[in-house]
Image (spheres, rainbow, N blue to C red):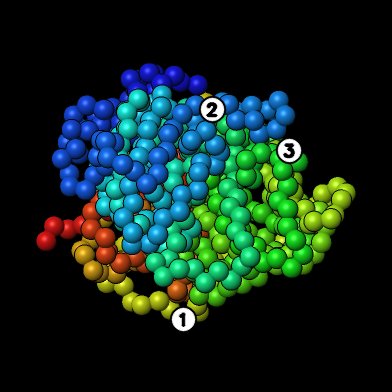
Amino acid sequence: MTSSSERLQGQSSLTETRFTRRDLLVGAATSGLAAVAGRAGQAQTATQPADHTIRIAPISLEIAPNKIIKTTAYNNTVPGPALRLREGQPATIKVVNDSGYPNLVHWHGLFIPPEQDGAIEEGSPIIQPGESLLYNFTPKPSGTRWYHSHAMAMTDLTISTYSGEYGFLIVDPAAGDPGRYDREIMLAAHRWDGMWVSVQDLRKGPPADNGLETMYGSATLGDRMLGHGEPIRVRQGERVLFRMLNASAAMSISLALSGHRFTVIALDGNPVPNPVSVSALKLDVAERADVIVEMNNPGIWVFGSTDYTDRSMGMGVVVEYENRTGKPVWAPGIISPWDYTMFARKEPAATPDETIDLKFEKITGGRGKYNRWTINGKSWPDTNPLITVQRGKRYRLAMTNKSNDEHPVHLHRHSFEVTKIGDKATSGLMKDTISMPRQTTAEIDFIADNPGDSLFHCHHQDHMDEGFMGLITYAKT
């Protein structure tokens, strides 16, 4: 594991000659930060009052008895404090960086200026250790958003999205929420104890030319491992809104609540055109789901991963009805397949002004080395810009995943409409992150209605750090 100084001063683990996120971070600490400091609307030195204060600092997180994770977190809790903002009402958030490394916070899913967005590639300023900044923005759209570190990690599996630096950000509608539920519960999934592994050395690993991958030793759904935290206590007849988030640095999850079904009402914070009842939720990294559960099956149940290995690592929580005793039961029933199109409309989407083909591929590093990722044959920073758009036009990104890895593809500062999954045309489903399983195709449309640099990347931390990102820029008018 590299130290902070080695991470900032050493050569890139990917290549000795390419300009990397690490180089960009070092630049931001000197001349780069000065360059972005003069941009209008950027985060300011934290001297004025704030609506919320977030302090990033090391903690010892006990996820089970005698199971301590040394990590960094927001306000000494994991997840960090749930922030509630009102759509259209300006907010000021002070961030104090005592994490020990250059850092910044990304406000995931918001339509805000690039300088406020929390991505250095867009011009957002780095917060140096011991310093603080004010983020000033007007939050929109409403829905379940979240906030997390957007620092680079490279080979260090203890920082950025590998750490406990994540939390829910709820933007309440300007007109109020009709509230067709009795209460809400927020649950974030996260994997811990990351390690670099030569996967091909495992029994069912890929070919021997594959590079290092991340594997994990423990997991949580909420703040503790399954069986070691307080249960979620419910009453018969309650309608509970669960806001679900996959806050891991890598790997998707599938979740089920034994004896119950989920009615999906929103994905990535955006209401779905067609709410559907499902037996399990599939969430790739950074994806969210708002689901209603009718508490109509009294007992003590396990809400957890449908994968036995994940549950044994701790990915789950107990749901306990009042006046019920006994051991928690895992009985998920038949797991229904996950398909974005079942939540969308069947009619084709509007015709785009332009279609852009994007192909994602892996350049394998070989045993003991790191893989590299490309978009149309190029890695960051050669993908700056990836594409240049004109304000007001509708763009279709026709994406092909040519690799054997799953990719949660995220577009900053915009929502997009899912318009095709494989050969199935669809419309109406708005998201900011889409999961692309291995060897699949998908199409998404976005309207260029939020000028400024916008980052497009895989939300797997190692894929992003290893080249899988590009910048969408707006043409000057």
The disc, 1 or 2, on the residue closer to the chain's N-terminal end is 2
Q: Would residue 290 be seen by someone viewing this image from the given angle? A: yes
Q: Are marks 3 and 1 in contact (CB under 8 Å)?
A: no
Q: Would residue 398 be seen by someone viewing this image from the given angle? A: no
Q: Residue furthest front?
A: 49
Q: For the residues marked 1 and 2, what is the alpha-carbon distance in whole angstroms?
A: 50 Å
User: Within 10 Å of the Cα at label 3, are there few (<14), some (14-19), or many (20+) other Cα atoms?
Assistant: some
Residue at the image point whose x is 46% and y is 81% from the top? 347
Q: Position of residue 176 (x, y in %)?
A: 45, 68
Secondary structure under tag 3 reads loop
Residue at the image point whose x is 36% and y is 77% from the top? 350
Q: Is residue 73 left or right of residue 127?
A: right
Q: For the residues marked 2 and 3, what is the alpha-carbon distance in whole angstroms?
A: 19 Å
Q: Position of residue 308 (x, y in %)?
A: 74, 45
Q: Residue furthest left?
A: 477
Residue 357 lies in what quarter of the image? bottom left
User: Within 10 Å of the Cα at label 2, are there few (<14), some (14-19), or many (20+) other Cα atoms?
Assistant: some
Q: Position of residue 269 (x, y in %)?
A: 48, 61
Q: Which residue is mark 1?
A: 347
Front-lying residue, 240 or 386: 240
Q: Which residue is mark 2?
A: 59
Q: Is residue 459 left or right of residue 15?
A: right
Q: Is residue 113 left or right of residue 316?
A: left
The disc, 2 or 3, on the residue closer to the chain's N-terminal end is 2
Disc marking residue 200: none
User: Within 10 Å of the Cα at label 1, are there few (<14), some (14-19), or many (20+) other Cα atoms?
Assistant: few
Q: Which residue is mark 3?
A: 228
Secondary structure under tag 1 reads loop
Q: Amino acid at mark 3?
A: His
Q: Position of residue 302 (x, y in %)?
A: 76, 51
Residue at the image point whose x is 17% and y is 44% from the top? 39
